[in-house]
Image (tube, helix red, strand yellow):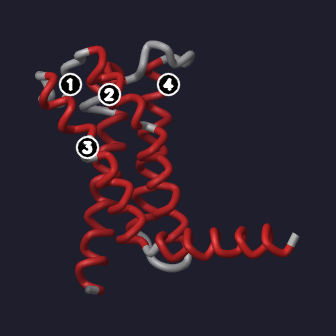
Amino acid sequence: MKFAKLSARLLLGAALIFAGIGHLTFSRQEFQAQVPVWLPLDPDFVVLASGVVEILLGLGVASFGKIVPLAGLAAAAFFVIIFPGNINQYVEGISAFGLDTDQARLTRLFFQPVLVVWALWSTGAWLLLKTMLGKLTKRSSAA
């Protein structure tokens, strides 16, 4: 099980770094197409900033030590935060990354929760989250 978690974590880290590099270089225009039009920020800025964040998250997830669960928690939160872009791609019928049908874009939406679970499980962030929630529960019940 340890090997599976380590492999999954390193693969996730590599995928985040690769996607981040794509944001900054070869996939920049396709990522810009996914930025929701209602977001009051320049699409190029959003793509560049999210690319830097993805690279940093990938490095954190693929590292070793106490930072890994925090990076996993941050990666899971990142996957939740960017989900509206995926919804926008589906609703607006935007073709990017080979997702050129409504069915393909809809199917992709179901993979975002998988990324969240992957980040939480492979990095040990589940335990961190459980501990944090336990402390919050104890504080609120003691008050």
Determine the CA span between mark 2 and mark 1: 8 Å
Give neighbour class at mark 3: few <14, some 14-19, many 20+ (Cα, 10 Å).
Answer: few
Give neighbour class at mark 1: few <14, some 14-19, many 20+ (Cα, 10 Å).
Answer: some
> Residue 133's x, y, as percent?
63, 69
Q: Earlier in the sequence, mark 2 or mark 1?
A: 2
Determine the CA span between mark 2 and mark 3: 19 Å
Q: Residue furthest bottom?
A: 2
Determine the CA span between mark 1 and mark 3: 17 Å
Q: Earlier in the sequence, mark 1 or mark 3?
A: 1
Q: State the SS at label 3.
A: loop
Question: Which amino acid is tagged 1?
Answer: Ala
Residue linked to disc 1: 96
Tell me, yes or no, whether the two marked residues, 2 and 1, touch with CB atoms within 8 Å: yes
Q: Residue at x 45, y 55 (%)?
A: 75
- Identify the disc placed on residue 45: 4
Q: State the SS at label 4.
A: helix
Determine the CA span between mark 4 and mark 3: 27 Å
Question: Which amino acid is tagged 4?
Answer: Phe
In which quadrant is the C terminus drawn? bottom right
Q: State the SS at label 1.
A: loop
Tell me, yes or no, whether the two marked residues, 4 and 3, touch with CB atoms within 8 Å: no
Q: Earlier in the sequence, mark 1 or mark 4?
A: 4
Question: Which amino acid is tagged 3?
Answer: Phe
Q: Earlier in the sequence, mark 4 or mark 3?
A: 4
Residue linked to disc 2: 31
Residue linked to disc 3: 110
In the shown orientation, is residue 129 left or right of residue 91?
Answer: right
Q: Residue furthest right?
A: 143
In the shown orientation, is residue 57 left or right of residue 99?
Answer: right
